[in-house]
Amino acid sequence: MAKDKVQKLPSIKRLPAYLRELKSLREEGRQVVSTTLLAQRLRLESIVVRKDLEITGVTGSPGVGYKVEDLIGGIEEFLGWNNTSDIFLVGAGALGTALLGYKGFSEYGLNIVAAFDADPNKVGTEIHGKPVLGMDAFANLAERMKIHMAILCVPCDAAQAVAELMVAAGIRAIWNFTGATLNVPEHVVRQRVNLAGDLAVLSVALAEKLKEEQRGS
Amino acid sequence: MAKDKVQKLPSIKRLPAYLRELKSLREEGRQVVSTTLLAQRLRLESIVVRKDLEITGVTGSPGVGYKVEDLIGGIEEFLGWNNTSDIFLVGAGALGTALLGYKGFSEYGLNIVAAFDADPNKVGTEIHGKPVLGMDAFANLAERMKIHMAILCVPCDAAQAVAELMVAAGIRAIWNFTGATLNVPEHVVRQRVNLAGDLAVLSVALAEKLKEEQRGS
DNA sequence: AACTTTTTGTGAATTTTGTAACAGTCGCGG
DNA sequence: CCGCGACTGTTACAAAATTCACAAAAAGTT
């Protein structure tokens, strides 16, 4: 019944989009929703939505749909976003600053507690209300506050060293915004934000579309 | 020979990572490289690398490997990153500012020409050396400069409206940094940066890893 | 020169992901 | 209370992506 074994990465990636739409639907005062409607709003096929929702274990009723509230709860629980977890951010450059200012993280059960940077000029300041601390404070604080997740947005060539420092401090999950490929022990999970990859897909898609037109499709 | 039909999206997404590593290898003075080495550096299987490189049409020699220079050229050509294309950015908020300051885009054959924003206080200023213009200037300038690509990083609820404005101005490819699902005509390609999706994968992976340990794996 | 090692390139097997088909349930309107 | 349209949940099927297996080529080694 409960799909514990199968991972279905693509489905997991789509869940946040459903969550967002569902919350918007709730705003509108909707109580129930069908996969047909969700699919329409998100430009997907209804069958995709149904399959994706299956992994959360939430169940709807035929002829009616799913309860919006149930789905929101189910997805949040499946993702572990129902109780917020604290996270550290390392690298208060342009990107780090933007992330620190992003309000939406609370939606994802994420709370950036503090930022860390090697630049002495930044240490001691605040960015978007979050304190910027020196790298030397990281390990101690991570242990004391039992922080398990970290956002990495330092320059590429510093990435590996910082990652190692994180691991040594007990970090178990690294959200990697740098282009570097991190080398971490087996017990640490990592997820890389691959902007270049997305752009590559866009470039190729555009080129193909234009070529198609030339051929007079 | 030339794989023109097959798309292989995952392969395309990995190409930029190879490109990065190859350039670094070139820095180090390397002339040839094997898929074994590339795989090792990027924490992949060599067969994955081999299959991915296949779509670029670049060919190596058995027992030796690929010429680094050939691969760099081949990948850049495949992605259309060999000659830079100009791009507009709309939404000079925190994220937009970060993107405007990102030096790495030239690696991707991308040149942000100008930013656009609705906020009158920002219009007329410069961010990281790029001029910030009013939204009313977009259409005219896009046509005059023959710009086909745009980066969208406005607030979620403005996304659709701005996208429509872009389409009307002749934009053919939209790189969407908002959470919104864009509704655009068939002849426009779009690529969404799905941060929440990546985080979802990270969350689930971490939860699973921790559960695994509890069971005493 | 024969042999070993490294490595490419490809066709085939396997797994994963996406799509279709359909039986069965629910609520509604006569 | 019967039939109809909307919708779920599941099973079967198709497509895509990954992994395997192996022949053949280049370079070095004995």
Image (tube, coloured by chain):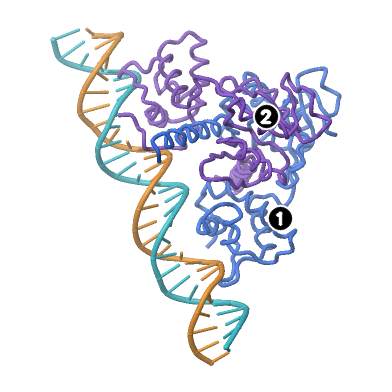
Chain colours: A blue, B purple, C cyan, D orange
> What distance separates the C-alpha of mark 1 from that of mark 2?
30 Å
Residue identified by numbered label 2:
A152
> Looking at the image, which is closer to me, B166 or A154?
B166
Q: Is residue B158 visible?
A: yes
Q: Chain of mark 2?
A: A
Q: Is residue D13 left or right of residue A184?
A: left
Give neighbour class at mark 2: few <14, some 14-19, many 20+ (Cα, 10 Å).
many
Q: Is residue A187 visible?
A: no
Residue A64, located in which quarter of the rendered image? Answer: bottom right
Location of the C terminus of chain B by quadrant is: top right
Mark found first going from the N terminus, 1 or 2: 1
Residue identified by numbered label 1:
A24
Name the residue: 60% across, 62% down: A58
x then y, percent, for residue B109: 55, 22
Say what secondary structure mark 2 lies in. strand
x then y, percent, for residue B39: 45, 26
Name the residue: 49% across, 14% down: B25
Residue type pointed to by label 1: Ser
Q: Chain of mark 1?
A: A
Q: Is residue A207 left or right of residue A134?
A: left
Give neighbour class at mark 1: few <14, some 14-19, many 20+ (Cα, 10 Å).
few
> Looking at the image, which is closer to me, B155 or A150?
B155
Q: Is residue B59 above or below residue B183?
A: above
Q: Closer to us: mark 1 or mark 2?
A: 1
Say what secondary structure mark 1 lies in. helix
Residue type pointed to by label 2: Leu
Residue A136, located in which quarter of the rendered image? Answer: top right
Badges 1 and 2: C-beta atoms under 8 Å apart?
A: no
Location of the N terminus of chain B by quadrant is: top left
Q: Is residue B194 left or right of residue B19?
A: right
- Badge 1 and badge 2 both on one subunit: yes
> Looking at the image, which is closer to me, B26 or A25?
A25
